[in-house]
Image: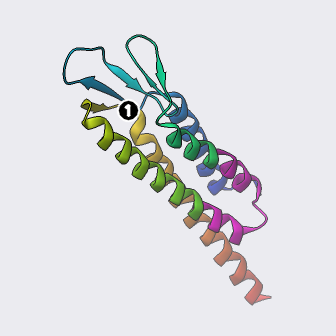
Amino acid sequence: MIQRKQSIFLLISFIVLLVCLCLPIGSIEPKGMGAEREMMNLWIVDGNGAKDFSVWPLFALLLLSLPIHLFTIFDYKNRKRQVSTCSVMLLLDAAWYVTYGLMNYTSIQVGAFSFAFAVCLPLVSAILLIMARQAVKADEALVRAADRIR
């Protein structure tokens, strides 16, 4: 059924990642003279309005994860595949943080980096994915127990 609690967890995780995709994830204050730069998932915006697309892998990881979320929500009949796609999405969230760390490491050389609120949203998504994965496993165990009784 699509009304299961894991479907709700997956839907909230989808919405959280969609919000993270739209919000700024940090700002870079240059060491010398210059305007503060704002970091989004797709680009870095200068004080002049120029965009640098060097952080596009962050956008790509989130954009890859979103359709997998929708697929997992509507794949409620195949619980084993739902568990495996939840694991794949957890790996994509971890890859986002690794990529974000690498992007921050390169930006530290340019200036001081400050984090934004949206950085914690993939972590919230990962927690929701873990909860959904555990609920799917519990459903699978319940179905197997009912099959053994028959």
Where is residue 118 drawn, in percent x and y? Answer: 42, 34
Left or right of 115 in this view: 60: right
84 vs 24, nearest the viewer = 24
Visible in this render: residue 80? yes
- Name of the residue lying farthest toward the left: 32
Residue found 27% across the figure and 14% down from its top: 34
Residue found 75% across the figure and 88% down from its top: 149
Residue found 19% across the figure and 24% down from its top: 31
- Name of the residue lying farthest toward the top: 48
Report helix, strand or loop for mark 1: helix
Which of the 4 image quarters holds residue 18? top right
Where is residue 105 drawn, in percent x and y? Answer: 30, 43
Q: How many marks?
A: 1
Where is residue 88 drawn, in percent x and y? Answer: 59, 62
Question: Which residue lies under the disc numbered 1?
Answer: 117
Q: Is residue 99 above or below residue 19?
A: below
Which of the 4 image quarters holds residue 116? top left
Which of the 4 image quarters holds residue 140? bottom right
61 vs 76, nearest the viewer = 61
Left or right of 13 in this view: 145: right
Q: Amino acid at mark 1?
A: Phe
Residue found 76% across the figure and 53% down from its top: 74
Colour style of the rendered protein structure: rainbow
- Magenta residues span 66-86
Q: Locate the N terminus and report the quarter of the image it occupies.
A: bottom right
Circle 1: is it few (<14), some (14-19), or many (20+) Cα within 10 Å?
few
| Residue 130 among those drawn in magenta | no
| Residue 74 among those drawn in magenta | yes
Where is residue 51 drawn, in percent x and y? Answer: 48, 21
